[in-house]
């Protein structure tokens, strides 16, 4: 692997880790496009490119979200009762999604990812902070069902689900601090089982790059994870200091830029 690509991956890992800690996401929104670019640069088979990007993203996510989760726990920002309700559904959805994804073409996955980014970016941008302080609505069946939906979508797109989980939790009267902490914990489990699913799905696939573990490319994953685990705790600490509206606006702009870049590459 060229030195320039290694440096790019290290910098990307830093940014992805910081965002993961800052917003309670898995970092896949940043990692997937970069892995796509590296895979295309190395002229890997087009039918495998998106699956490699997603599988590698999950491999990185395990370490990124673990670092975030540990730091969030130190901040006492994780409600494990709510997390427990959502994790069960998330794990099942993630496993199902990883199986379904193996039957979807790489191009279709890219378009699905782009549409997803634009929709969520718009929702995040227009969202207004609710000043009401109502009692949290944490019905187990509702939490578990939504967790399953998020796990399924996350597994197909290679994300940790934070962009869905955080707004959902806030809508159910969970504070933003708790929502980000809970999302970090859920993203760890989504990343772990997503990695297992994509490893299994890609185990006997021919034409994958050297040193691949299923659809996860180990050299790329290591370069990204090394810096992401350093910057994730920094992102967690920063999230308690910056105005939430600034974070929302920055996040929505990032998603639109990423989606536009992938869409330009598609055509």
Image (spheres, rainbow, N blue to C red):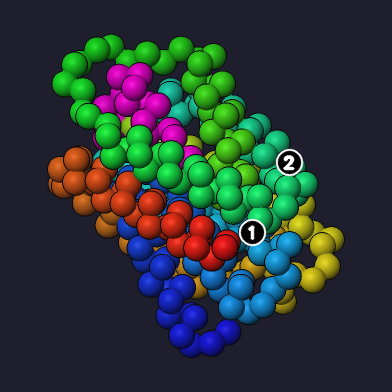
- Please tell me whether residue 244 is drawn above or below residue 63 in the rendered image: above
Q: Is residue 213 magenta?
A: no
Count of picture labels:
2
Q: Position of residue 2 (x, y in %)?
A: 54, 87
Residue placed under numbered mark 1 in the picture: 50
- In the drawing, does residue 133 fall left or right of residue 89? left
Q: Quadrant of residue 19?
A: bottom left
Q: Residue 68, how many percent across, how many down?
A: 38, 49
SS assignment at label 2: helix
The residue wearing badge 2 is 100
Between 204 and 41, the residue placed more toward the observer is 41
Residue occupying the point 63% across, 50% down: 109
Residue 90 seen in the figure: yes
Question: Residue at point 57% right, 63% down?
Answer: 267
Q: CA separation, marks 2 and 1?
A: 14 Å
Q: Residue furthest bottom?
A: 3
Can you give x and y, in whole percent of width and height, for residue 176 in the image?
27, 32
User: Is residue 13 shown left or right of residue 53?
Assistant: left
Q: Position of residue 266 (x, y in %)?
A: 57, 61
Q: Nearer the viewer, residue 217 or 125?
A: 125
Q: Residues within 10 Å of mark 2 (few under 14, many from 20)?
A: some
Residue 165 within the magenta-colored segment of the rendering: yes
Helix, strand or loop at label 1? It is helix
Residue 131 falls in image quadrant: top left
Count residues near mark 1 (Cα–Cα under 10 Å), then give few for <14, some for 14-19, many for 20+. Answer: many
Q: Nearer the viewer, residue 191 or 40?
A: 40
Which is nearer the N-term, disc 2 or disc 1?
1
Residue at 48 percent across and 87 percent down: it is: 3
Magenta residues, start to end: 159-178
Furthest-front residue in view? 267
């Amino acid at each position: 692997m060229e030195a320039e690509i290694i440096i790019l991956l290290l910098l990307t890992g830093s940014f992805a880790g910081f965002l993961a800690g800052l917003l309670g996401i898995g970092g896949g929104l940043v990692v997937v496009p970069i892995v796509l670019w590296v895979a295309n640069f190395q002229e890997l088979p087009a039918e495998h490119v998106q699956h490699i990007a997603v599988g590698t993203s999950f491999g990185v996510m395990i370490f990124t979200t673990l670092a975030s989760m540990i730091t969030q726990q130190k901040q006492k920002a994780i409600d494990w009762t709510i997390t427990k309700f959502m994790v069960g559904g998330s794990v099942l959805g993630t496993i199902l999604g990883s199986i379904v994804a193996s039957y979807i073409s790489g191009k279709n996955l890219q378009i699905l990812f782009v549409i997803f980014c634009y929709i969520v970016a718009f929702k995040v941008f227009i969202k207004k902070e609710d000043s009401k302080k109502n009692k949290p609505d944490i019905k187990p069946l509702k939490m578990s069902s939504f967790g399953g939906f998020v796990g399924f979508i996350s597994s197909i797109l290679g994300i940790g689900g934070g962009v869905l989980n955080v707004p959902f939790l806030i809508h159910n009267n969970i504070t933003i601090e708790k929502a980000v902490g809970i999302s970090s914990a859920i993203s760890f489990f989504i990343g772990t089982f997503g990695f297992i699913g994509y490893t299994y799905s890609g185990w006997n696939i021919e034409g994958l790059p050297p040193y691949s573990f299923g659809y996860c490319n180990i050299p790329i994953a290591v370069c990204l994870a090394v810096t992401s685990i350093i910057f994730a705790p920094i992102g967690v600490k920063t999230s308690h200091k910056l105005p939430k509206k600034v974070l929302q606006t920055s996040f929505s702009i990032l998603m639109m830029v990423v989606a536009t870049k992938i869409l330009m590459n598609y055509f």
